[in-house]
């Protein structure tokens, strides 16, 4: 995945462009890998899976484009609040290998 698709911050990672591929980085002292599966914007569904060496609390921020008319989001199948177009949805929690965002 192109490095411009994600930005690393002291809080965690921001994913701003949705391209299929894998983002590899370190979150603090933990190696992290984020797999992105999508055909967005043609399809509209985005799937991000998290793979970490060990459980770690940090933020994953997902860009919600201003042209997005509606959106829903779930972490491990549990629905989160309504998604607001033209902003970043910031998810701070303890993440572990196998977690996923849809």
Image (spheres, grey):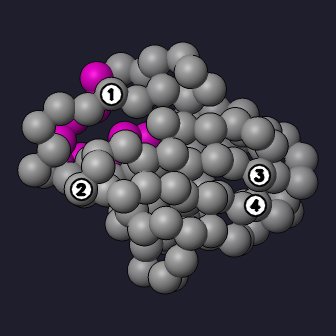
Tell me the CA gap for discs 4 and 3.
Answer: 6 Å
Contact between labelled residues 3 and 4, with CB atoms less than 8 Å apart? yes
Residue assigned mark 2: 42
| Vertical arrangement, residue 46 with respect to residue 69, above or below | below
Q: Is residue 38 left or right of residue 10?
A: left
Q: Secondary structure at mark 2?
A: loop
Q: Closer to the camera: disc 4 or disc 2?
A: 2
| Vertical arrangement, residue 55 with respect to residue 15, above or below | above
Dot placed on the residue nearer the N-terminal end, 4 or 2: 4
Query: Residue 70 falls in which quadrant of the image?
Result: top left
x and y percent of residue 78 in the render?
A: 54, 17
The mark found on residue 32 in the picture is 4
The mark found on residue 72 in the picture is 1
Q: Closer to the camera: disc 4 or disc 1?
A: 1
Contact between labelled residues 1 and 4, with CB atoms less than 8 Å apart? no
Dot placed on the residue nearer the N-terminal end, 4 or 3: 4
Query: Is residue 92 visible from the viewing direction of this image?
Result: yes
Tell me the CA gap for discs 1 and 2.
Answer: 16 Å
Q: Residue at x 43, y 41 (%)?
A: 90
Whether residue 99 is in magenta: the answer is no
Tell me the CA gap for discs 3 and 1.
Answer: 23 Å
Q: Residue at x 64, y 47 (%)?
A: 49
Whether residue 83 is in magenta: the answer is yes
Dot placed on the residue nearer the N-terminal end, 1 or 2: 2
Query: Is residue 11 visible from the viewing direction of this image?
Result: no
x and y percent of residue 69 in the render?
A: 11, 37
Magenta part of the protein: which range? 82-90
The mark found on residue 56 in the picture is none
Q: Closer to the camera: disc 4 or disc 3?
A: 3
Dot placed on the residue nearer the N-terminal end, 2 or 3: 2
Q: Closer to the camera: disc 2 or disc 3?
A: 2
Residue assigned mark 3: 51
């Amino acid at each position: 995945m192109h490095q411009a698709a994600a930005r690393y911050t002291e809080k965690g990672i921001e994913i701003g462009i949705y391209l299929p591929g894998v983002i590899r980085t370190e979150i603090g002292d933990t190696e992290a890998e984020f797999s992105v599966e999508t055909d967005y914007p043609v399809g509209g569904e985005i799937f991000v899976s998290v793979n970490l060496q060990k459980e770690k609390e940090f933020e994953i921020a997902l860009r919600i484009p201003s042209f997005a008319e509606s959106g829903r989001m779930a972490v491990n199948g549990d629905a989160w609040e309504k998604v607001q177009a033209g902003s970043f949805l910031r998810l701070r929690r303890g993440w572990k290998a196998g977690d996923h965002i849809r």
